[in-house]
Image: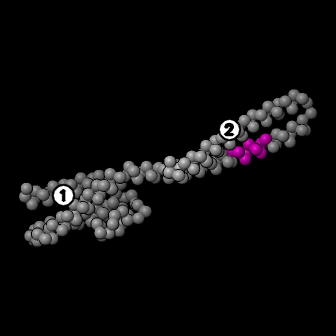
Amino acid sequence: MSTQTLLQSLEQQIENLAREIEPIAHATAQQARFDVALFSTKGTRLREYLVEVRTNFAQLCQVVNENRSAQVAYVAERLVSQITALQRELATQTLRKADTQKEVKSSDFYSKLVEHQQYERRIIAMIEDRESQLGKLATFKEQQHMQKELAALEGRLMRCRQALIKIERSIERQERGF
């Protein structure tokens, strides 16, 4: 294979990589994605690394044209390593999304916990209110009706507490990594 054919093939690979990166090119990470030995860019967006790959490709073309074989080998090896690293990063995006979804689930568990704790407090307040009314009722029929309401509220409180226990267990499992 001629050098020009290899360069065209490499350029095509870079363009394919660019198309794959495009949908997530602007997404930021919390820290630099790659080691400084591989990329001089310290950015958090894939597009910044892609710019460096393109710059290195232009440098490779220049050293090929100048027929500097030692530099050609170095730049080509570095470029291939960078392309491979970006391809691996793309391949792990589904795992990164899953991690993000776990974080969202975690906050969902905590918000459910708070919500159910509020339900529990309201039900307890309703039970206390009904119990205080029960002593003030004059007729037996009214007392029976109030006792039925209290029984229903006690059932709701029991189900709410069971839900709270399940949510707390889910949080514990998640924190343990299960």
Secondary structure of the residue carrying tag 2 is helix
- In the picture, measured across the screen, residue 172 lies left or right of residue 74, that is right
Residue pointed to by mark 2: 159
Residue 87 against residue 60 in the figure, above or below: above
Q: Return the mark for residue 44.
A: none
Residue 129 against residue 70 in the figure, above or below: above
Visible residue check, residue 86: yes
When asked about the image quadrant of residue 162, the answer is: top right
Three-letter amino acid code of the residue under disc 2? Arg
The residue positioned 11% from the left and 71% from the top of the image is 68
Which mark is first along the chain, 1 or 2? 1
- In the picture, measured across the screen, residue 117 lies left or right of residue 79, that is right
Looking at the picture, how far across and down is residue 78, in whole percent?
22, 65
Visible residue check, residue 54: no
Q: Return the mark for residue 11.
A: 1
The residue positioned 75% from the left and 34% from the top of the image is 152
Looking at the picture, how far across and down is residue 20, in whole percent?
29, 52
The residue positioned 91% from the left and 30% from the top of the image is 139
Residue span colored magenta = 119-127
Decide which of 73, 47 is in the foreground and name it.
Answer: 73
**Other-residue count near label 2 (Cα within 10 Å), few / some / many at <14 / 14–19 / ≥20:** few
Name the magenta segment's main secondary structure: helix
- In the picture, measured across the screen, residue 50 lies left or right of residue 127, that is left
Marks 2 and 1 sit apart, C-alpha to C-alpha, by 63 Å
